[in-house]
Amino acid sequence: MHSPGEDNGLRDAIFEYATQRLDYNPPPLDGPQTFEQLSKQAGLTITEEGLGGDKALEVFANVLAPATISTDHPGYLSFIPAAPTEAASLFDLVVSASSIYGGSWLEGAGAVYAENQVLDLLAKECGLPKSCGGVFVQGGTLGNLSALVTAREVAQKKHGAKDYTIICSTESHSSVKSVAKVIGVGTSAADSGETGAITYESAKAAYEAAVAGGLTPFAVVGTAGTTNFGIVDDLAGLARLAKEKDLWFHIDGAYGLAGILVPELKELYAGIEHADSLIVDPHKWLFSPFDACALIYRNPVLAKEVFSQHGEYLEPVNKNKDEWNPSDYAINLTRRARGLPLWFSLATHGVATYRDAIRANVDLAHQAASEIEKRDYLSLVRKPQLSVVVFERDGWEQADYDSWSEKLLAEQVALVLPSSLRGRPHTRFAIVNPMTTIELLIEILDSMK
């Protein structure tokens, strides 16, 4: 089972499958099947005797993969899609084949060095000091969790045990509420208003209401590109509030912070340089495969004091205090070097190519908005800031959106799911794939007539 090359035929077959998948242009959209359908087609795959590699690969290729939607399809426009470069996907194979442990400098110095160059690039773009640092974790939820755990610990050292709460937006990602529940604190929502962005005034009002209710705010969370609308909060205003009230300033940029790479968009992110922590997910708008979240701290020593693990078996790892151990900076010990695919793609293509690709997505979003405004049966809900376009089909209810969306997927055109704002249904394009075209978006818009 562990002898290298004992089944070179299987190795060749898997390489051939991976190559064919990378060659698809576009990949098949595919779609889910019921449990009963999969049970009938795949049957029992885990047996005492084993199926053999060829048979197992056949089941995956012919049954399981077609029942899995391709997030890199140019018509995958729901949630936040993924569009990894070929270089990033290929290097993901290398990372797996290399069996790299990315938790410590002792065991993964080369990998950690490369990952940290990516973190340094992102921090520099955000205007953070050279002394900052962080780690790649699984996704935005764990990034937000690790940052806000650090923030809570800092607050407890200052103020002791309190009924703590987080100031956030009504349009903050669902993970913020989930994190609050996990760490035993509350959330106090600031009204995002018609623009979708919380401001100094609305966040201050939420702060004052929380204090009046007997709560102690310890952090304010700004969003650099909301999932539903792609809106950037008033980060400069939130930084001002954080300074005035001695709050930890965290920025959830899981989707939208990547836009800071485009020079003409930088003004949207004014104030980000004051963040105590921030996140951005490369598997969203930085063209990397699942799963990766870059988590960066202004003062990583504070995180290390919270997360560094100790034990007799860990002393060789902790012996040199100057070494950078990624496991010290988040809720993780064992970790995959998940930042390497992004490093390889950036090293291959250069940052300028990334800037151009992100810019093209934003331009396409504005083209789509213009097409929507030309149609008398459609209405923009908000003008796009980044690459999310939200619109309504006049006169449609939730059931209309549902049936239209199901038809698009059944015809293998696109995955465009309904969403809502304050109970009112709409739909949206989340554009992060450079292969998405205006022709496809027009086809989708025309299908609503």
Image: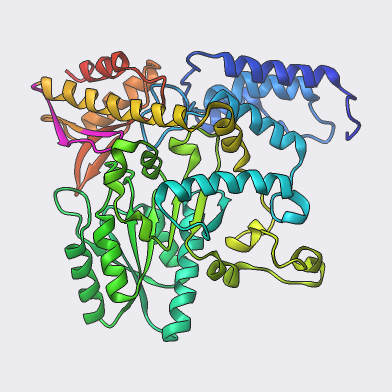
Which residue is most to the bottom?
160
Task: Judge left or right: residue 329 versus residue 152.
Answer: right
Depth order, front residue of 199/130: 130
Which residue is most to the left?
376
Q: What residue is at 24 percent from the left and 61 percent from the top?
A: 237
Residue 243 seen in render: yes
Image-quadrant location for residue 24? top right
Q: What residue is at 29 percent from the left and 36 percent from the top?
A: 264
Image coords of residue 92 (percent x, y): 64, 33
- In the image, the segment drawn in magenta is 376-390
Image coords of residue 299 (percent x, y): 50, 66
Residue 44 seen in render: no
Depth order, front residue of 57/200: 200
Q: From the viewer's perspective, is residue 103 above or below residue 322?
A: above
Image coords of residue 58 (percent x, y): 69, 19
Report the number of numbered marks. 0
Q: What residue is at 55 percent from the left and 30 percent from the top?
A: 36
